[in-house]
Image (tube, grey):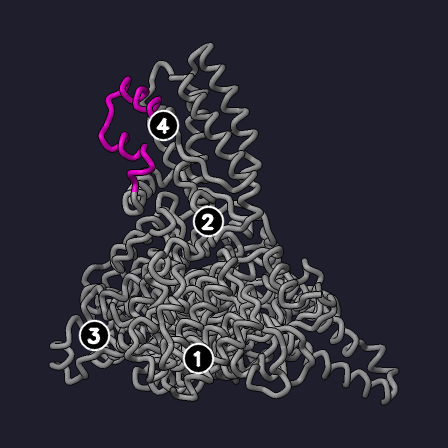
Amino acid sequence: MPNPNMKILVVDDFSTMRRIVRNILKQLGFTNVEEAEDGDVALEKLRNGSFEFVITDWNMPNMTGLDLLKNIRADEVLRDIPVLIVTAEAEKENVVQAAQAGVNDYIVKPFTADVLKAKISRIFPD
Amino acid sequence: MNSSLQDIIDTAALTLVTADITNLQDLGKLYTCFEQLRKCDELQTHGEIKEAIAAAQTLIKTLMLDESARRNNVQEIISKTITAIQHRIIPGTDPREHPFPEELLGNQSSLPQKDTHDYYRLPAHIDETIFFDFLNNQDTVFEKLDALLLDIEKQFNTEQVADVRRIFHTLKGEAAIFELHDIHQLCHKTEDLLQSCETSLPIDSLLMISDWLKSAFTCLRAERKLLRVPQTLQKLFVQATIQQPPTQKSLESLQPESIGDEEAFVINKMIASSEPVQQKTIQILSGDMDLLSDFISEVKEHIESIDTKLLTLERNPHDTDLINAVFRVFHTIKGAAGFLALEDIARLAHITENLLDLARKGELVLESGKIDVVFLAVDEMKKLIKNIEKAITKGSTSYERTDSLESVIERIQNFAKIKQPFTTASFTATSHEHTVISEAPAQPLAKATESGAEEDTTLSIQKVVLATQEGFVSTTQGQKGKIKEAIKVDSDNLDKLIDSIGELVIIESMIKQDSDLQRFASSRLQRIIAQMDKITRELQQLGMSLRMIPVKGTFQKMARVVRDLAKKSGKDIEFVVRGENTMLDKSVVDRIGDPLIHLVRNAVDHGIEKNSEERIKAGKRATGSIELTAFHKGGNIYIEIKDDGRGLNKDLILEKAKQKGLLREGQNLSDREIFNFIFLPGFSTAQKVTDVSGRGVGMDVVKRAIEDLRGNIDIDSIEGKGTTFSLRLPLTLAIIDGMLVRIGEERYIIPTLSIVEAVRPKPHEIVTVVNRGEMLQLRDKLIPLFRLSRLFRIETAQQDPTQGIIIVVEESGKMAGLLVDELLGQQSTVIKSLGAFMNGLIGISGGSIMSDGKVGIIVDVAGIIKLATSQQDIYQEQSSNI
């Protein structure tokens, strides 16, 4: 597992969801977590802070998770930040687009700490 | 051969060599390569190649979406595919030497497949820990069951039989939640069987069932394997049912193989409709209550915003932005509910999401009538949320399900013709069927999301335009752009803080007014005190503002009320909301809802004319209008409900008042006073008045509710033109601005809100009118004079009005002059309750701690005016006896 002090940005328009993800991350030992409620805010935060990992929801107003991903990948500075996209079972097909846009992995909600841990270990191999 | 085509193939080959097929990014790149190939002009005519490309893409997609898919040989298969393509486009090579890999085309079964045939998949909305809790519980359940069965074998006991039935019933319900369909059905059948056994039980059979269930749970726990109900058990069942009159259905549904999704669903429905009561209470949580209550409050906000959106949508059923916005709310709720194991909410949100998805895709137009189903879902969601909220407040871990949930879900399902229930993996479906079920709706969904997302950016702009057009002022979307940090605070803590601030304000004014201090304080100390005074005041204001919330939520409810009622009564009504962002103390907002609903309902029911013909005849627009406005004025909040309907009929009200003996002969009343009659209890029950002039039922209740909030209500109406109800409300309930007065040695506080003016009368201004007692002649008005000293029995008080001060107060259009000795000053006071035993005293509404630490009594102006006007005679009689 990567450094527990890794700075993580959780993006979701629903604050309860952000809290859930944050709690799960905390269970896994990651405490340096910030939140953003949509893609615009996320990009602003990313550009102003040294984030090492982004967990974003797919379905958000203003800017979808996919667009956020595309924006990150198109940004000189941010392009290498690993992105994990959260999707609903019914929208799993979206993953194809996300994969093409360069997402590192996806996770289907609801997920448990173990599943997230497995995803993170894969994204950050030792 | 085209070089770009060659380039793509080269890239594909290179990507493949370096690819890690467990890595999503690599798979994405590979997928893109094939997509480029697919779009190549040169390949458009090669049917075989196109087929292979499509098959390769499907293969890659499977790897992306299903992590359990087998991955051996995949690299080789794709590699062979690329080679085969290459050899079909390079002239002079023999394609037969490089065939497409068999695994890719033709023989589908060799493609990577999930080997989840007989494995249990946890439903997406259920948390794993809950599932394990459930499994672990079963040991004790079966221990108990076996013991019961053995007891019953020794001696038949109806109570114990009932226990057995309850065990199966509970298990059945739980199995349904976890989508363990076999177990669910077995329990259902067993339950039926038990129900029909009146004198003895087939103990052997039941023990066998128990044994099978035990092993089924063991398998589930160990390897997540699903056991099939064995033939022996089924035979046993048939035998058992032979003893009872068997029904065709019960035999059929016992065989899992014969049950398709739809039938299983029918059974589910049967169960749901036949036993809603027994399933009422279910467990909700093992988890974080804090998180849950946050979720609930967030969902509430979202749901409230939906109402407005739906109302607008009803007028513009094709507004995809709006549909998307509503869809997203349900989608988000479903997602979070899944984490919190709120199965009911997840299901309801899911089914509504499906319906809205059809609307998004244009397969269903949510026009008037059809949108009712969505409203139905919203209402049901509200009910569920309320029940859960109740449970949380009580600290309970279970909540009451709504009786109507199943029927609502069914209605939505029927409506949308959504066949599959909320299961992605159905037990009886083979894996092939499963793929069909889950993939069919997903494809268009993905497309819809994509297009939806692009349109989202224009959402807020369009909404505002729409809002003005429609007369709806909705700022929900407009505000989204502003990013504000907010912290959620426990409202109890907030109240404590405000209480403390209140005490601080009192202490501060005690210091400020301390006589020693005023005598000895240096100018420096006085400056510091002045500074402290300023800061305390700021703190007080800030504290108050913390409790302030916009009236928007309540107003949105009204929009819904108008819509539903207008529809029911077939009236065409435009509802306009203004000033919905006006802030008001939360406790006021919470309590203003019911009276507002009442007034709005009256406006629709009785205010607006029965039909548009009547309106047109009266020279009005065909569409009726109801306006709800909130605004600040002079430290108060005003809420106005204005309709352009028939207006009140003064003559009828007067006639009615005369009948009731509320009017004296020759009494001249202002319009306001006439209208105020409708607030009298029982006044409205007269059929004639309610039918013709309309207003009425329970207006006294409305008035009382407003007065309880220390506000008042006024009517302004012009016959034939419409009626306006204005509510004046205090900004907050915790603090009032009061005028401190002295009567004899006592001090009282009169709420500044009610004070019109204060005068020292000249002798000729005090007149005694026959039947009405002492009056104050104030300019051209006669106002009853009321001696507070008599009510409060203060003997040292000034008896001569010309030596005292008369404070003219007004409440609901009625005035009175209160005689006091002296005005001491104005101050904000924190209201304290005098305790239950002092409740309901006439003339007193509460107490307050004064700057010297003593208690001051707050005068209840409304009560006093009532005494001063309606009971003037009695008072006069009393006073003449003294």
Q: Are marks 2 and 1 on the same chain?
A: yes
State left or right for residue B646 relative to residue B106. left
Q: Please, what secondary structure does the residue beneath circle 1 have?
A: helix
* Dot 1 and dot 4 within a common chain: yes
| Residues flagged by tags 2 and 3 on a common chain | yes
Q: Residue at x 35, y 14 (%)?
A: B199
* Measured Cα–Cα span from mark 2 to mark 1: 46 Å
What range of the chain is rendered magenta? B233-259
Residue ID for mark 3: B572
| Dot 1 or dot 3, earlier in sequence | 1
Question: SS for tag 2?
Answer: loop
Q: Are marks 1 and 4 in contact (CB under 8 Å)?
A: no
Q: Which residue is labeled 1 in the image?
A: B477
Q: Nearer the viewer, mark 1 or mark 4?
A: 4
Q: Say whether residue B67 is magenta.
A: no
Asked if residue B252 lies in the magenta stretch, the reply is yes
Task: Look at discs 2 and 1 and give the one toward the viewer.
Answer: 2
| Chain letter of the residue carrying label 4 | B
Question: What is the chain letter for disc 2?
Answer: B
| Residue B791 visible in the shown view | no
Q: CA distance from mark 1 to mark 4?
A: 60 Å
For marks 4 and 3, the one nearer the N-term is 4
* C-alpha separation, residue under disc 4 versus residue under disc 3: 64 Å
The amino acid beneath tag 4 is Gln
Earlier along the polypeptide chain: callout 4 or callout 2? 2
Q: Residues within 10 Å of mark 2 (few under 14, many from 20)?
A: few
Q: Within the image, what quadrant is residue B253 found in?
A: top left
Per the image, label 3 sits on a secondary structure element best described as loop
**Spot occupied by residue B709 in the image (x, y as percentages of width and height):** 49, 66
Q: Which residue position holds label 2?
A: B115
Residue B389, compared with residue B257, is above or below; it is: below
Image point 38% across, 47% down: which residue? Answer: B426
